[in-house]
Amino acid sequence: MECARKRGAYIQVPQNPHPNRKRPRAEDADSPIRPYDGEKKITVAIDAELLECCVCCGPLKSPLFQCTRGHVSCSECYTAGADMDYECLMCREPETATRCRAMERVLDGLSVPCAFRDHGCTETVPYAEKQTHEATCAYLPCHCPIPGCDGYSGGQSLRHHVVVYHPEVARTRVAPRRLTALRMQLADQARVLRLGDDEGREFMLVVGRDMPSGRALSVVHLVNENEPVVENDFKYKVEVVGKTGVLSLSGQPEAVDRLTKPYQATAFLFVPNAVWEADPQDVPVFLELK
Ligand SMILES: [Zn+2]
Ligand SMILES: [Zn+2]
Ligand SMILES: [Zn+2]
Ligand SMILES: [Zn+2]
């Protein structure tokens, strides 16, 4: 098709290069873009920023809009701009409600490698499905709160990982509403706790080693594989009995199915080394769950 720019001001009637073929009807603002049906693929390297919204830097997803200066924004940011008298949030030029169909078509035909290629994933997925794929990718790197563990790849839950890769972590059955002595050893990094007789309710006491002068104890609720993470009513109390007093922390354990970011306890009990190391064979840790 003839390039619009070449027509110039003196050509009054643009030539149809294919006179036997009807011109396609102009699309209105809401009609769907023609789906990309290309078989002919080429490989290109592209600056990742070009596939991000100019305003929120999130991945571009159709429908896309552009301002008079060509800043492309996602529909969420366009809507936010609409609340501000149709200004582009980047340059404050008027927002035109113009769909950026060229970019929509480019995105439509784009396939990208999974972000976890370096971890072994060889999948190439349509750009629009990239986030969905990566959330469930079998090579998704996951973190483990047990000190010294480098984490694991795959979609499995932390609970599954602890069972398979940490046989050294002891398990203790804890009766509900009763402080139970865990009889931990000096070098213990964690303890799995099963609440009552219900096989489904497991928790983990993590003995954090981030601080040189002591241990940071925290409790997580290990959620079952494929179980949705919901707010729960579980409560814990952890106590460490020293010669000069009792250290205590109560709270609600954070429910964890898997950690896609390094573990950071939402609350922890700091136990100075002098207290933790007083009896290497029986560190006086007590725990209650309900
Ligand atoms: Zn945006
Ligand atoms: Zn702009
Ligand atoms: Zn993948
Ligand atoms: Zn681990």
Image: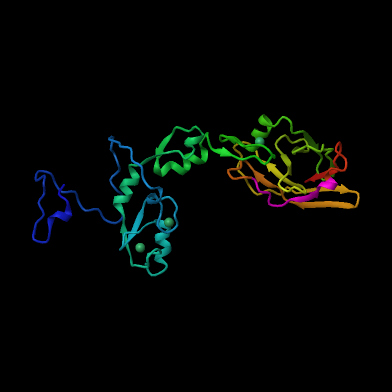
Q: In the visual, does 76 lie left or right of 106?
A: right
Bounds of the magenta span?
Answer: 263-275
* Residue 233 spot, x, y in % from top left: 71, 49
Tell whether position 4 is magenta: no
Is 16 above or below relative to 76? above
- Residue at (47% x, 36% y) in the render: 117
Looking at the picture, how far across and down is residue 19, in whole percent? 9, 46
Left or right: 183 in relation to 7: right
Tell me: residue 204, above or below residue 58. Answer: above
Residue 47 lies left or right of residue 18; in this view the side is right
Q: Does residue 52 appear in this view?
A: yes
The image's colouring method is rainbow
Please, which residue is most extreme toward the front here? 212
Q: Outermost residue, bottom direction?
A: 85
Q: Position of residue 46 (x, y in %)?
A: 36, 45
Q: How many marks?
A: 0
Question: Which quarter of the rendered image does ligand 4 occupy?
Answer: top right
Give x and y (percent) for residue 4: 17, 54
The residue located at (44%, 42%) in the rendering is 130
Is residue 31 shown to the viewer in this render?
A: no
Closer to us: 169 or 287? 169
Q: Who's the residue at 9% across and 51% down the image?
A: 15
**Depth order, front residue of 154/20:** 154
Instruction: Please check the rendered image and state whether residue 264 is part of the magenta-colored stretch, yes or no.
Output: yes
